[in-house]
Image (cartoon, coloured by chain):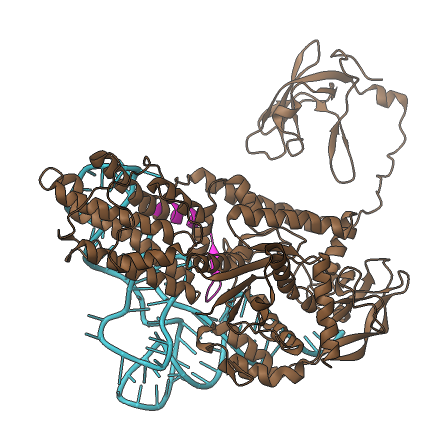
Amino acid sequence: MKKRYLVTSALPYANGPLHIGHLAGAYLPADIYVRYLRLMGKDVVFVCGSDEHGAAITVRARKEGVTPREIVDTYHAIIRDTFQKIGIEFDIYHRTSEALHHETSQDFFRELLKNGQFEEKESDQYYDETAGQFLADRYIIGTCPVCSNPDAYGDQCERCGSTLSPTQLINPRSTLSGAAPVMRPTTHWYLKLNEHEAWLREWINTGTAGGQTLHDPADWKNHVIGQCNSWLEQGLQPRAMTRDLDWGVDVPAEIPHSAGKKLYVWLDAPIGYISATKQWAADKGVAWEPYWKSDDTALVHFIGKDNIVFHCLIFPAILKAHGDFILPVNVPANQFMNLEGNKLSTSKNWAVWVHEYVAELPGREDELRYNMIKNMPEQRDSEFTWKGFQESTNTELVNNLAGFVHRVMVLTHKNYGGIVPAVDQSREFRSGWDAEQTGTYDQELHQLHLKLSEMGREIEHFNFREALRILMEISSAGNALLQFNEPWKIVKDDPELVKVVLNLGLQYVAVLSVASRPFMPFAAARLRTLLNLPALQDRQEWLDLLNDLAEGNPVLRPNHALNPAEHLFGRIPDELIEAQVAKLQAAAAAKAAAATAPAEPVAPRFEALKEEIQYDDFAQLDIRTGTILEASKVEKADKLLKLTVDLGFEQRTIVSGIAQHYAPEAVVGRQVLVLANLAPRKMRGIESQGMILMAEDAEGRLSFVSPAEGWPNGWGVK
RNA sequence: GGCGCGGUAGCUCAGCCGGUUAGAGCGUAUGAUUCAUAAUCAUAAGGUCGGGAGUUCAAGUCUCCCCCGCGCUACCA
């Protein structure tokens, strides 16, 4: 293992909140890894931050009539808060809008320029002559060539998901002025990636660079290496590192032609890792360089699969081009997590938003973490379902884990008043790991040692699901230990054996209190409290535990007093997941409805006037004031409400087609106008004795028309 | 269109460089048990390893073709 670790998670883009896919992809795995390293006493820094630049943010700001700064401030706060609540514990959560980051990125640009890594190239880009500026891809909309969506963006069509370039759009227009953009030449700095191709190929496939072996490619995931080779085989092309943008890091002003140019995301976001480290070091009063420039540091990037080539090829090329910097020792990219059979989609609002989860299911952070780790998309895309979430919580966390802890605690309280009993370590009993085997105290502690080190090994190799499985194996073995030895039964005949079994059961729980922390930090803390052990401080408690177990030292000493038994987890009732599923579907349906609604407000088209009539024609209508007394839905009718209306001199039953606009309870007490001499008519078996007058607009919205408040019922309208 | 990664029990997923009867958790069935949030433990049933062909003494594991999912990428209107 290396001397120190620098762990990064992909910077979340600050124009929206986090969903479970983000969590499962880049943040939870990193958090597990880092928490484990801390418990092993390693020197580790875990950095992240908001990625706050780019056209998508300015587009959104324009649409909402606010400044880009307001957008990023809002989401930066939400995201930071969400991480904290779900227990993702960064050493620093920075942001790319900080001055420190701008300086760091600009220094990188200067250094690369000085090293001759760039070539200036001219290309044609769309330009808005009215607004007087070049247009980022996002600023151009037009008809999608694939699905004919008239409002596709220049980089992507949000309806069909196609990746586009602005030149593919049919009838492109600028979102700034609405004008058709024109092509105009512009100059940018291109990183000569082609010159880095050879060493990147060797580094990816053999782990060696500059004659030095830096990592073992066998430790990298298949899909990561495959994706990189896919790119390498097509040949790397120079890539623009600057853009014509209005929200980002300026190309340093002293450089000719820099006016109006911003650093493109690849010279911005990943360098955010470095800026964050610098800020952390400054806050802490330590040097940042060893974490980025020392061979005995392991740099690990946690990302989603969409980010592979940038973290495995482009960013390493940038680091190498700069010189001094180390390369990542691994980039354990995860695949994607789907939701209830469909891809997560922000634009379709098909997502479980983490900030909503922590608000709606407070105190259940670990239940989500557990299910996400259990289904983490480590090797391929995986799936989150609310039903699965309920099952994993109820069967594994509540039944197995919490059940085991509770029965050991209860039995100890019942038999020994909550005091850890002293034991005769020579006694043999049935091992929890094998019903056929007898075990001794020493052997069981040794077995726990093996399981704990096995878990550590899996975590070190980014096999978090497997590590979690072993955690549950310890709990199951604990349950079996009780089951095989039946302390509740033998307590009368062989009290000494009961002491051994329960003491050992408590050692299992103590091991769980440490081993569960990387995965379920909140539950781990509760376990420490139950056992009356000090809270974990990330001071190599895992390592100490390994050593103690190896030497046969129990974690909980005889006569140690426990706290009262409490349940570690609570069941998730059916209603809770039904509500979440309904919410998910409603949100998606609302979004779909909004998408099909006319995109632009069309000029209102009033109905043509009807044929002229005489006063006598009007006088035939007997319109009266009335008040709705009762209202109820008509069965098997979507639109109908059955109303009882007071006309002063009598009450009428009136069936009215307003159910889709008004809930029954919302119309009771309402004053209305009633066409009182309309011939009765049966609707859905109910005779309607009149008609409620409503105003209706072009979109079919309805509104009651009524006399002024407090007007008596039964009087005519002239 | 090209490239990459996947397609394994009802469900969610492991299976490294080819080698005894293909694994785990959940679910199901049966039995045991009652300390514990109708929890726990044991046993069993269940898969022609996407389809086809080939290499090999031997293939889920290698090669080729096809189908499906996902990702990256090209090009065209």
Q: Residue furthest front?
A: A285
Counting the numbered discs, the total is 0
The image quarter containing residue A680 is: top right
Residue A656, image x, y percentages? 66, 27
Q: Nearer the viewer, residue A627 or A420?
A: A420
Q: Nearer the viewer, residue A87 or A108?
A: A108
Q: Is residue A376 left or right of residue B21?
A: right
Residue at screen point 65% across, 57% down = A13
Residue at screen point 72% across, 69% down = A107
Q: Nearer the viewer, residue A544 or A484?
A: A544
Residue A6, image x, y percentages? 54, 64
Q: Residue furthest left?
A: A493
Residue at screen point 74% across, 53% down = A60
Residue A629 versus residue A510 in the image, above or below: above
Residue A39 versus residue A401 in the image, above or below: below
Residue A706 shows up from this direction:
yes
> Chain A colour?
brown
Q: Nearer the viewer, residue A5 or B25?
A: A5
The image quarter containing residue A320 is: bottom right
Residue A353 shows up from this direction:
no
Which residues make up the magenta segment? A377-395
Residue A184, image x, y percentages? 86, 73
The image quarter containing residue A45 is: bottom right
Q: Is residue A202 left or right of residue A120?
A: left
Chain identity for the colour cyan used in the image: B
